[in-house]
Image: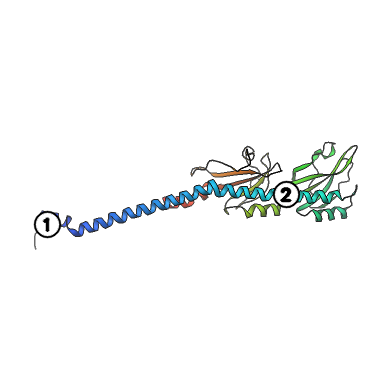
Amino acid sequence: MPEIHAQSEDLTINSLVTKVVATVFVGTFATALLVGWIAIQSTRDFVERSIDERYPRAVDLAAQASATWLAAARARLEHAVAELSRAPSDAELAEALEKARGFEGIRICGSGAAERAAGLAPDCPHASRDAGAPLGWLATRRADGARQPAIATPLVAAERGTRFAIAAFERKRLVDLLGVHRPHPDALMLLASRSGEVLAGIGAGELPKRVDPAFARPSGDSSTPSAGSIWRRAIRMAHPIAGTPWHVVFEVPSSVVYSPLLVLIR
């Protein structure tokens, strides 16, 4: 058997074949690193654009669509209520509800008023017994205990107080409007009051009953995002609904937003 000398080992290590293999390995490894880095950068840019542009734009559009629909529904209700008599019958109320469109139910409230109702009518506010009955945008309670957006409009002005009609907005229609602009199926898109009560919304699971009141009152007319971070539990944004005391609130788990980036890093 031939002996293997140290010189032969040196020649093997420094041979052309070894150098070619090493060069190919280093080149392949460097290429993989470069491709991985480019993929991570591209994914990070996409995530940042979603946080900085895509999500705020979706919230803005949802708020604009909600404002347009709510204003139109209010105008139809006021027109329908203006045609009611001083003491409308159930049939007249049902007709007004049909004309208004966009409402689940309507009820007559106020001092000296017979509480007639049509549809899934909301309860009269407690203050409706007083002369200073609340009018305008309201949050009422449904039969199941959930809060619901509503509007109160004057019916008949009298010496002892004011009779008014209160109508509950059709939640399904509001949910559809919010859902159209929801940018991710795992995100929450909510309609919330200034006090943080959730009045309508759509999400992957059970909706929260409240959101942080401070967050539901963003300053200015544009979306106010929370600082996005891969370590935060969720990314939240809010936008006021013009002409109302309500806001569209958006929330998506950080794990969902950053999941493409986390997959590449792992």
Cα separation, mark 2 vs mark 1, equals: 88 Å
Residue at 77% from the left image edge and 45% from the top image edge: 151
Q: Is residue 77 visible?
A: yes
Q: In this figure, which residue is indicated by the disc labeled 1? A: 8
Q: In this figure, which residue is indicated by the disc labeled 2? A: 70
Mark 2: few, some, or many residues within 10 Å (few <14, many ≥20)?
many
Mark 1: few, some, or many residues within 10 Å (few <14, many ≥20)?
few
Of the residues shown, which amino acid type is indicated by label 2? Leu
Q: Position of residue 179 (x, y in %)?
A: 63, 54
Q: Is residue 176 left or right of residue 235?
A: right
Residue at 59% from the left image edge and 49% from the top image edge: 57
What colour scheme was applied to this rendering of the protein?
Answer: rainbow
Tell me, yes or no, whether the two marked residues, 2 and 1, touch with CB atoms within 8 Å: no
Looking at the image, is mark 2 or mark 1 earlier in the sequence?
1
Q: Position of residue 56 (x, y in %)?
A: 58, 47
Q: Is residue 204 above or below residue 221?
A: below
Q: Is residue 253 visible?
A: no
- Mark 2 or 1: in front is 2
Picture disc at residue 221:
none
Helix or strand or loop: what does disc 2 sit on? helix
Q: Quadrant of residue 215?
A: top right
